[in-house]
Image (tube, helix red, strand yellow):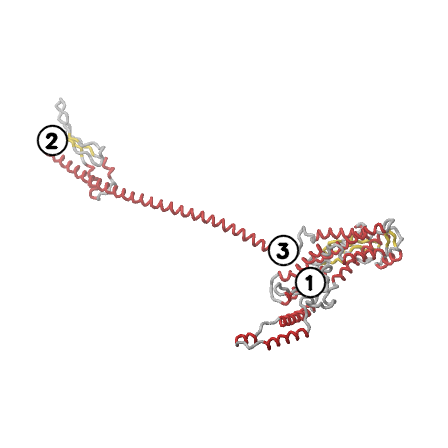
Amino acid sequence: MISMPTDPSNPGARQSTISPIQSNNDNNGPPPPTRKRRTDLNKYRGQGNSNDTSRQQIEEDGDIEILQISPESVDSNSAQRLQNLASRYKSRYETVENEKGELIKNVYELQIKYEELQKNYKELQGRMDSEKRRLQQRANESDLESQNLKKQLMELKEEASRYQSALGKATNVRWGDDDSNNPVQLTKSIVEIANSIAEITTVKGKDVTIIDNTANELLQKYNCLTRVNSGKSWKSILAAALQRLIIETLFQALSNYLSQCDPRTRPKPLIYKQQVPSQSLQQQQQQQQQQQQQQQQQPQQPPQQQQQQNNPQPSNAQTSNAQTQAQSVIAAARENIQSLPKRSSSLIVSTNSNSILRNPSSPVDHNNNLEVEISLTMTSLVGLVNHLAETRKGSDDITKITPIKIRQQIYAVLGTRGFCKDNHPFIEQLTTTILDTLSRYRQMNKEKLAVLKENTTKLVTEFVHLYFRLNAQEPIPDFKDFFDAGTPVQNNLMEGAWDDDASDDLEVEICSFPLISVKSTKDNSRKVLSKAHVVPRKSGKK
């Protein structure tokens, strides 16, 4: 049997063998040679990286035959065919070997490229991890910076809020809800004072004796139709008339007291009377003569010392003269300042470094009349700030609101601590005036006079505080509006003992407590803080 080489491109392919055919015992000759075409080579089509000629040669080898020839039938023709077949197998084997080498080379190159790519991948992976860590760190730093910026922003917002709140408070003319000057709190104080006035002006009881003549004169003064001992309600009307009289007396006395030191009506003060002792002209002349004698008695000195003598340091007398001249200039300036409207004589710019610029002594007793000086100084300062706002250029709001804030704060202080002193002369004097006024219209036994005096003193102090607190409002309410007798009853402005449905037929008999309200600048409407207390009567009653 003759074996042919195996197909190197297809190791599983069957080897081409030439084996002798076993002869049979019969007389038939050897079987004819069979020819089988290989079709497995079709899988080589389109594969490998060899040139087109080799590939075409492999594809053309599809007609290679597998010959089965018995040894007895081998002839020259068969041998030639076998040689051709072997040659073609060899050629195909060489082609496949070449392709195998190229494939191995390609695999090696691809392996190298793969390793390079793997190396590049690892480098890129490392760079990416490093960049990722850097970005993560930067993100963390950015988050921390962002948190710090947010914290700073919150602090700045809080600071701006504080500044805004401070500016709002500086420009806000409304009082807080818990402040005693708030309109709600002020209304409660008005009710309490009205009740206190009603207590001290009572005319009911066995201990009270009415003086008919003066009582009738008081009722006639307010155009009341009721007279003493006429009708059932005459005592209520008389008590209401006394309440109105007391309120008017308090307002008048307080107004006179606060205007007693008006610079337009009081004498000019003596400036710096006790601060710098004045020297007479004779004493000054004597001091100058002594200095001249000392200069004549001194020996001749070098030019430098003589020059120093020509420019001597000011002596005590010269210093006193300079102080006197400065004092005169300041006094003249103060006289000009005093000519300004509503200006207190004690208001002057002061510095701690110069005793000459200290506030001078005021003709007003600061111990007892301190409230007067504060009120007048406030009025002067408000006038100056208003004048500044009118004559100096600017567009800020704080300058416009400052006079209002000054008035509000000063009157709020006076409404809290004003006259809060034991045995204050003004309070005692006003208390005595009220008691004397009441004694003209009624008499009470001595046992109740002590209690009455104590209640009156308390009432006067509270009333003065109410006066200041009313002036601390913005705008300042009207608090002296008494309705005259005969005025038709108005439910929105008055309160008293009547039914709202029957008020059309009523008019005012006596108004015991004034209407306290704020008039609108746009129309005739009013914001009522406290209605007027009214005792009514039938309309058209004569």
Q: State the SS at label 2.
A: loop
> Three-letter amino acid code at disc 2?
Val
| Percent coordinates x, y for residue 88 in the rendering | 16, 38
* Mark 1 closeness class: few <14, some 14–19, many ≥20 residues within 10 Å: many
**Image vertical order of residue 466 relative to residue 73, above or below:** below
| Percent coordinates x, y for residue 329 in the rendering | 65, 71
**Residue position marked by numbered label 2 in the rendering:** 74
| Percent coordinates x, y for residue 391 in the rendering | 63, 67
Q: Earlier in the sequence, mark 1 or mark 3?
A: 3
Mark 1 or 2: in front is 1
Q: Is residue 268 visible?
A: yes
Residue at 75% in and 53% down: 190
What separation in Å lies between label 3 and label 2 (alpha carbons)? Answer: 131 Å
Q: Quick one: 141 or 112, which is closer to the camera? A: 141
> Three-letter amino acid code at disc 1?
Thr
Q: Is residue 507 visible?
A: no
| Cβ atoms at labels 1 and 3 below 8 Å apart | no
> Three-letter amino acid code at disc 3?
Lys
What separation in Å lies between label 1 and label 2 (alpha carbons)? Answer: 153 Å
Q: Earlier in the sequence, mark 3 or mark 2?
A: 2
**Residue position marked by numbered label 1 in the rendering:** 377
| Cβ atoms at labels 3 and 2 below 8 Å apart | no
**Residue position marked by numbered label 3 in the rendering:** 169
Q: Quick one: 44 or 304, which is closer to the camera? A: 304
- Quarter where residue 490 is shown: bottom right
Mark 1 or 3: in front is 1
| Cβ atoms at labels 1 and 2 below 8 Å apart | no
